[in-house]
Image (cartoon, rainbow, N blue to C red):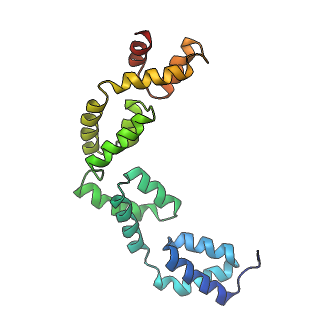
Amino acid sequence: MNNKPFKHERLKDYALWYYFRYYPSNARLVQKLNEKGSQEDAEKVFWKIKHLTQEDEIIKAKIDNYIFRNKNYRYIRQKMREKLFPSEKVELYLEKYLESWKSILTENFLRRKIEILISKGKSRYHIFQKLWETKEDRTVLEVLLEEYFLEWEHENILKEYKKIKKKYPKEKIIQKLISKWFRYDEIKKSINS
């Protein structure tokens, strides 16, 4: 593999290719240019093509895509931060959703996610903390979790208990189950029955 820095013209070609292939943030584009060429050339190339970059439009498109894919606010913020988009611009665009839709998660999505997490033996509290974002999410989640956890909590505690009961003393088992976000009173009820 050739690790020699790109010359100015090749770096410009790379910048255009990379930008129109991935639609990165300006910061990520500069970072990639610095990896491929000298810092001086990277800055020059970036300023030559900056008029082509449309970071605000890319932020909107990426956030809309995440929302279309039923991603929650925390996920969107994390991914946009990883891609080096300016957090103030991300927050500004997300505010429009917070004002208009309140909840960006659909009930069908929440149902599927709850079922998946229950099948993995997750506690009611764990599921709630993972999926809850807005007041509207909270209301829908409480209703759905009440519906799903009539018997599931007890079964999930017993399932986890059976996995670890021979490995640890009773006090340690309770600690392990609490660390999986099961409530103490539910644990006591389930393992003593």
x and y percentages locating residue 78 in the rendered image:
47, 54
Looking at the image, the residue that sits furthest to the bottom is 9
Q: Which residue is at 25% across, 51% downward?
A: 102
- Quadrant of res 192: top left
Residue under the point 51% across and 17% down: 174
Q: Nearer the viewer, residue 192 or 94?
A: 192
> Residue 7, image x and y in percent?
71, 86
Judging depth in this view, the residue of 39 and 192 nearest the camera is: 192
Q: Residue at x 31, y 58 (%)?
A: 95
Q: Depth check: 170 or 26 in front?
A: 170
Q: Which quadrant does the N terminus fall into? A: bottom right
Q: Quadrant of residue 158?
A: top left
Q: Does 90 sit left or right of 6 as displayed?
A: left
Q: Position of residue 69 (x, y in %)?
A: 36, 58
Kindly identify the residue that appears in the image at 24 percent across and 39 percent down. 139
What percent of the width, then of the height, locates residue 184?
42, 18
Of residues 87 and 158, the one nearer the viewer is 158
